[in-house]
Amino acid sequence: MERITTWNRKHVLLADALYAVIISIFFTLMAGTNDSNPGIIAYFDHTVMAFWSFVLMVPVAMRRWKPQMATLLFAGLVVVQLAFGPSMVYADLMAPWMLYSAIVYADPRNSKAFIVLAVAIGALASPVIIWSADAGPILNQGVPFDGLSPLETCSGTYIYGLSGDCATTITTSSVAIFIFIAVYLFAAIIVAYWQRARRITVSMMHERNDALQAKEDEERHIAALAERARIARDMHDVVAHTLSIIIIQSDGGRYAGANNPALARQTMETIRHESERALHDMKRLLGVFGGSDHADYADVDALIDQANAAAGMGCTIRKTVSGQPRVAALGAQASTAMYRMVQEALTNVRKYGGPNVTVQISEIWGADGLHVTVADNGRGASSSLDGHKPGYGLIGMRERIGAIGGSVTSGPQLGGGFVVSGFVPYSTVSTQSEDAAPASESSNAASSAAVSSGAAIMPMAAPTTGTVSMATDTGMPGRQ
């Protein structure tokens, strides 16, 4: 049944034509049982009735393909049939079906016009049917034909005129026939409007489903793009950070190899360690092999120690902490984002800051979130004089932190050097969990973190944002 219904919807003209042929054959067989049928003009045998049954089935075959044209054609043929053919044939029973098709499939604005047309034809057909049966056809003048004869009270109408009894009989019978036709049409109208409302509802549901599907596809596409951007940013951080250390260590090891083999071996060991660390980062990033979980802000001190050990050329990195550290309150995304920001800032210092650079990292734990500033006294704006063009590191940094409600500013500072400042808010869930924990545990955890990192806790009035330039990535020379 599902296949038949699907085929019926896809081949409306062919399906309706097939139905029309089957119905017309059935009507023809029924017409063969009647020897004759009266009309306004004359009596007609079953051959003429079969002819009209086939003719009226032509618009029925087009009722869904061209519903408006088919309904008008059917109405015109019925009027011609009433005037020049039998007063009633079996195909006339398709009139409510045609009205149904006009209401359901044609322009809804024309529905009322088709209803008025159907009622008008029904009002015309009622007296024609009764007149041809009671008074007889005009050409027969009240003479019996093939066993059919006019009503006795109306038999002399064409000779003596319409009598009172005949007029009453015809009027009463016409009203009865019209009531029957009106009830038949009314039922068709009710079913048609219900079906049209159902079709509209189904169509709206399909449109809504299509819109939801399109929205889901777009959300999946956006999520895929966001994931690609995240992977690209993290890969940039991992690769740029590790390669900058390896390049510096390789340069030092090349010169130490000739005079200090021990230092050269130590340099190669540092390169191996950083390569392994980068491999773990890549495993963690791709989430395939289950690499280490050290890329969050709780490990920023290890990152600083690593950068100090591998900096070379007299680079010094210092860190100050203000406020009570609340790493657990950051949340996973914010913790990783700030770790990556510090990592990217230190990578850029190694690449573009020049020799004998001092880096000051200021970590401020406020009431609403974490402020971190990485400032150096390196070459700053002049780092672009070697022809280096800005890359995508700072762009990815800003996108990553902006996605969690934070902000990043970066640029050369007055008096030389470069500064990167970022802020991330505390995670609501993490903050609530932290507030639920005992105050003593939070205090012990904070003290332990400060001791293990070797950081000097110094009170600071405000983050060093006064020296931060609000320049965009494309306007920041010499930095990625």
Image (cartoon, rainbow, N blue to C red):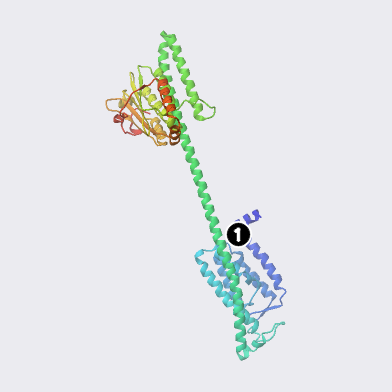
Quarter occupied by residue 420:
top left
Q: Is residue 160 above or below residue 280?
A: below
From the viewer's side, name the closer residue of 151 and 332. 332
Residue extending farthest left: 415
Q: How many marks?
A: 1
Residue type at mark 1 is: Val
Q: Residue at x 55, y 69 (%)?
A: 72
**Is 2 left, or right, of 319 in this rendering?**
right
Within 10 Å of disc 1 (Cα), the crowding (few <14, some 14-19, many 20+) is some
The residue wearing badge 1 is 12
Question: Could you say where residue 110 lies in the image, as x and y percent from the top left?
Answer: 51, 67
Left or right: where does residue 388 sit relative to residue 67? left
Q: In the structure shown, which secondary structural element does the residue marked by tag 1 occupy? A: helix
Quarter of the rendering occupied by the N terminus: bottom right
Which residue appears at 43% of the width and 30% of the height?
335
Q: Residue at x 68, y 65 (%)?
A: 22
Question: Which residue is most to the top?
Answer: 259
Question: Which is more toward the observer, 186 or 380?
Answer: 186
Residue 271 seen from this side: yes
Q: Position of residue 237 (x, y in %)?
A: 43, 27
Say if residue 40 shows up in the picture.
no
